[in-house]
Amino acid sequence: MTDNQSTTPTDFIRAIIQEDNRTGRFGGWVHTRFPPEPNGYLHIGHAKSICLNFGVANDFGGKYNLRFDDTNPTKEEHEYVQSIQEDIRWLGFDWEDRLFFASDYFEQLYEYAVRLIKKGKAYVCDLSADEIREYRGTLTQPGRESPYRDRSVEENLDLFERMRASEFPDGARTLRARIDMSSGNLNLRDPILYRILHESHHRTGDKWCIYPMYDWAHGQSDSIEGITHSICTLEFQDHRPLYDWFLDELEIFHPQQIEFARLNLNYTVMSKRKLLQLVNEKRVSGWDDPRMPTLSGMRRRGYPPESIRDFAERVGVARNESVVDIALLEYCVRQDLNRCAPRVMTVLNPLKVVIDNYPDDLVEEMQAINNPEDPSAGTRNVPFSKVLYIEQDDFREDPPKKFFRLAPGREVRLRYAYFITCTGVVKDPQTGEILELHCTYDPATRGGDAPDGRKVKATLHWVSAQHALPIEVRQYDRLFLVENPYQVVEGQTWLDNLNPNSLEILDPCYAEPGLKSAQVLDRFQFERQGYFCLDPDSTTDKLIFNRTVALRDSWAKIEKNL
Ligand code: ATP
Ligand code: MG
């Protein structure tokens, strides 16, 4: 027995399941599934659905399936089948041997359709797609019955078999359920079950030229797999009466459908069609562009899977639509990385510092802490020498109030090293650009404290110039400029809301030499900057780091508000 069976459930779905278990409705058994259509990569919304479906099964000691709802041969591709599996595994779930495809049930679904025909509950219709739409009526007007609605069972069986046998061209006929053309629920107005489509399918090849509609395939696939709780998003609520009708007419195992609200995030789009457009129009580098809300994009950007699961849990499940602030996701990412990511020193916008009183050839190894949150991560040595790089932002020739970092005549601490005092500024005589700083150090402050007890107000990170590892850094900002990309002024489209500065490349940046051994997707905290992850575009000659998420920069905040 797991906790969820005895304690208060955390959401309304778990409450329903707990009640079903109490009444013994499914014999106490819980079996869920995640049913993606392989027509795009998974995004963070799908992650919510996965965490919910698979999480529920885990909580109740049940099982979960991965099933591809691959009923549409024109839009589905093998690439997506692969990527979806990779992403779910990465997220931390294992469907064991329970990988299924709706296309595996085509024969069974065909038989079910024959069963409906024999009961007089389905018919072959010769209306065109346009005519069917026209006959369908509207929310306020009932539909009209198709002139083919009263065909005999024999004729329907014959025509349906010939549809399958490729006797008719695309669109010539459909198989429709015979329900109620005046139903208040448009889904019940004789919906199409099968259409003719002479297209190759990624798994069944040319075996079929009729394909089941999603609505016909989905509920029956759940039934075939013995899914007890068929969890789906709210837009399927109005389809539930149809699914119930199918299952009842067929008299087969009847899962319980439960709907919940989709996850929406601000500053992004989540429709697969829109994401595909971004990819096709090369607005991003691909489905796994680190700015994309896809799981492959987030993986490449450095988001740990734990943080996505944590996010899904914090967001919870509800029955009303809402938009979640992307800052919550970033918070979860920071929380997780703060715990796990080793710290390193890197300088992103380098400013050269010469320590005039430091011996020319001396190199000292300074001991640095790998992760203050995790003592077991130990320490490493970082080389220190006469010429260093610090961050341009850490120096102001004319420091404003509250700027406590380096300035002429001022003393600061170099992390894990010495106190230094700025004694001179070398500038380009033409442009006035600061080329390098001259400083002195106090040898008595090694390790970062002054024996006389004097204090400094800032601690800067640094990299020894002669040991520096040049790296490229890709800094990402929100993909869209506005919270709701679909809100546009007249004459513009959602694409006009794209942030033109969502990618900034810094090259060269300098890192402490130990970073050379980083492996693709390894994550780090670059001290005082943020979290970064090694991009797969890296080569042995050139390491490229993606900024996963920035740390909060207190000075930048003050400056903005000045
Ligand atoms: P489409 O609109 O193209 O069908 P989809 O996002 O519904 O796209 P599916 O592959 O059908 O894509 O989704 C698989 C499962 O993920 C479905 O059960 C769907 O309800 C769920 N899902 C999709 N988007 C979200 C979201 N934003 N939040 C929560 N669940 C989602
Ligand atoms: Mg869908």
Image (cartoon, grey):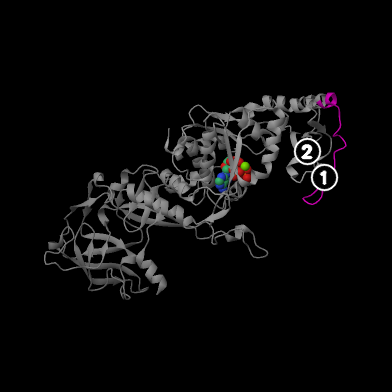
Provide the major secondary structure of the magenta segment. Answer: loop
Quadrant hosting ligand 2: top right
Q: Residue at x 41, y 70 (%)?
A: 560
**Is 562 rendered above or below residue 416?**
below
Real-space Cα separation, disc 1 to disc 2, in angstroms: 9 Å
**Residue annotated with mark 1:** 143
| x, y percent for residue 69 | 62, 35
Q: Residue at x 16, y 68 (%)?
A: 454
Q: Nearer the viewer, residue 394 or 463?
A: 394
**Is 386 rendered above or below residue 231?**
below
* Amino acid at dot 2: Asp
Classify 10 Å Cα crowding around label 2: few (below 14), some (14-19), many (20 and above).
many
User: Seen from this angle, which residue lies furthest right?
Assistant: 147
* In this picture, residue 219 sits left or right of residue 444: right
Q: Which residues are magenta?
A: 134-156
Indicate which disc, 1 or 2, sits on the residue closer to the N terminus: 1
* Amino acid at dot 1: Gly
**Residue annotated with mark 2:** 190
